[in-house]
Image: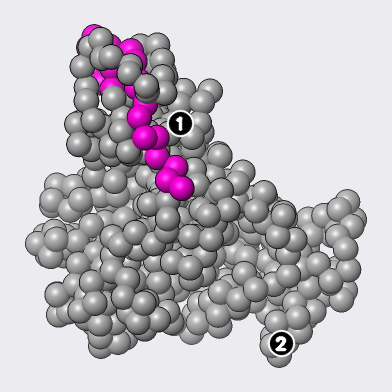
Amino acid sequence: MSPFAPHALLTGARLRPGDDPVDIRLRDGLVAEIGQGLTPFDAELHDAGGALAIPGLWDAHVHFGQWAAMARRVDVADTESPDEVVARVARHLAAERPAPGTVVQGFGWRVAGWDRLPSTAELDAVVGERPVILISGDCHAGWLSSAAFRALGLPVHEGHLDEDEWFPIYQRMADLPEDPAVVRASLDLAMRRAAAAGVVGVTDLEFETGRLEWPRRTAAGLDLLRVRTSTYPEGLEDAIAAGVRTGDVLDGTGLVTMGPLKVITDGSLNTRTAWCCEPFVTDDDLGDPRGKRNVDPEELTALLARAHAHGLEGAVHAIGDAALLDALDAYEASGARGTIEHAQLVRMEALQRFADLGLVASVQPAHLLDDRDSTEALWPDRLERCFALRSMTQAGIPLRLGSDAPVSPLDPWLAMSAAVHRSADEREPWAPEQALTPREALDASTDGVTEIAVGGPADFVLVDEDPCPAGLSGTTEQAARLRQTRVLATFVGGRMTHSA
């Protein structure tokens, strides 16, 4: 059964601040008519009460299952040492007393800034024979107890794991036993919270086989969002065999579509594994001072070419500037189209080539709030090239904003405000010349839809005030206005998914 409203009429909505209210007729998931005094006929009626209607918001990069799981995880963010992490885990175990055999998961620790690395032994000393898996705040590393290694059928490793050693374990976490009712409840809660923020759709870059998992979820009633799912190289041949192409509808509701091939070519800033043209600035003796190249250029080109030949776009993770250059080379050589995910550190001289290739920059501005101190410590000689949103825009590169949830919250208003103000505290914005205007940030958050128009999707949000008013005195006020925007209602395919 389609979740789209077969016929609905929204009355008294403003399409622009200061304009007279209009009525919007919605049929079968599309905007059918816009005018004043439209006849209701047999429509389901919604009164906007003069609220401003804007296109529905998208999060262009999430790991939705991991984001939903945050409701079930121990919060170990903002910790300053391994000792503080294990103390929080100990308090959780004492307070919650999870059943024997339950795999306890935690999230948020970041090794950057710690004066030593964590050990398996110190975690074991607190948790004993209980399996515990602690995911780093950038999702690029894991810290496991010995019992967790054994539960996964793996040899015990002394110390934390990152990148190539960690990702296979991260992928397998979905197979660990959990109460299905609890998992479903957390997915439902995550969807409702997203809808309450005005989100109508997400690009889900989770490790699971989303083209199979999401249709099961929507059939079970988890249908508040559009989902563009993905595959990783491990599932590429299965996707090709199934005949799915980017943009194909995958479920009976019409909410789930096939997205890109996701390839992780390098690491991250905080694990000091982003693949860079110059070494990290640190006193530590790094085995890979320029980070890690996870996929060599020839393999990346071959993967993109294979995907492109079968109608799949690419989504290439590139945080370091050397990884960005590798990605551009592979896109050009393969003829593929798609996105660069993150583009956190760029080469200014490569941006015009980026634009000329017709690629999209899928960026996560809220990361610049979390990564400011690490960037100043590890990349102090290249600050002006980090989160270079203005330079990318000026080069003609389309931007799509996202969160990378759970790395940052699934909150488009936070992402927009970070893109505009570039500071999370009393400090002055860093690299303020790279800021976006509020309108640019909003337009980069609607999946390319810039207005509500006849024939367009009936995906929109009612808000209390204009989130991008003229006349605000600076980026502090502009960012605050974005963060304070109140979502009154969200519609997906003409169906109300949230009402305040």
148 vs 381: above or below = below
Amino acid under disc 2: Gly
Q: Is residue 13 magenta?
A: yes
Task: Answer left or right for 153 relative to 215.
Answer: right
Q: Is residue 478 magenta?
A: no
Q: Position of residue 21 (x, y in %)?
A: 27, 11
115 vs 489: above or below = below
Q: Position of residue 226 (x, y in %)?
A: 41, 48
- Residue 315 placement: quadrant: bottom left
The residue sitting at 86% across, 53% down in the picture is 96
The residue sitting at 30% across, 33% down in the picture is 27
For label 2, the crowd category at 10 Å Cα-Cα, with few meaning under 14, some 14 to 19 and many 20 or more, is few
Badge count: 2
Task: Answer left or right for 177 relative to 497.
Answer: right
Render colour scheme:
one colour
Which disc is residue 6 wearing?
A: none
Task: Answer left or right for 192 relative to 29.
Answer: right
- In magenta, the rendered stretch is 1-24
Q: Which residue is mark 2?
A: 153
Q: Which residue is mark 1?
A: 496
The residue sitting at 25% across, 10% down in the picture is 37
- Residue 4 placement: quadrant: top left
Which is in the foreground here, disc 2 or disc 1? 1
Residue 385 seen in this snapshot: no
Q: State the SS at label 2.
A: loop
Secondary structure mostly taken by the magenta-highlighted segment of the chain: loop
Task: Answer left or right for 324 relative to 94.
Answer: left
Distance (Cα) linking label 2 and label 1: 46 Å
Amino acid under disc 1: Met
